[in-house]
Amino acid sequence: MSKDRMVSATVNARGEIAELRFHTDKYRSMAPAELASAVTEVIERARRDVAQKVSEAMRGLVPGDSAAREQAVAGDPSALLEELGLGKVNPPA
């Protein structure tokens, strides 16, 4: 939810937008750049929050430090795999 409670975003465990909701009509009078900034900010905050929650939930299941787990949750497992001694992973061609 934005600080002014105008817009909220829900993201799934992969950080993809599941829902974007406007709670007021304030967006109608906003400049395009201001609206874009507000939406981007609330989506990024939602992504950070869900990544942290997933990382915390995985704490006992997946070894490694929280930064590596958060990267793995976000779709880049390379730091976690390197930390576990599994070397670099090359993406499929």
Image (cartoon, rainbow, N blue to C red):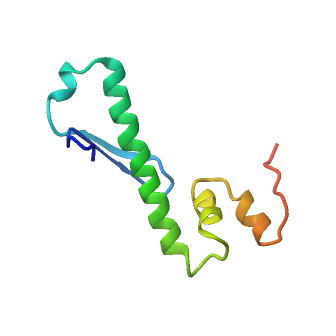
Above or below 3: residue 72:
below
Residue 82 falls left or right of residue 71: right
Q: Can you name the residue that lies furthest to the left here? A: 25
Depth order, front residue of 92/28: 28
Q: How many marks?
A: 0
Q: In terms of image quadrants, where is residue 31? A: top left
Residue in the image at 59% along x and 79% along y: 61
Could you tell me residue 42's position as x and y percent? 35, 42
Could you tell me residue 45's position as x and y percent? 40, 48
Above or below 52: residue 61:
below
Q: In terms of image quadrants, where is residue 2? A: top left
Residue in the image at 64% along x and 70% along y: 65
Residue 52 falls left or right of residue 90: left
Quadrant position of the C terminus in the picture: top right
Could you tell me residue 32's position as x and y percent? 32, 18
Q: In terms of image quadrants, where is residue 38? A: top left
Depth order, front residue of 4/18: 4
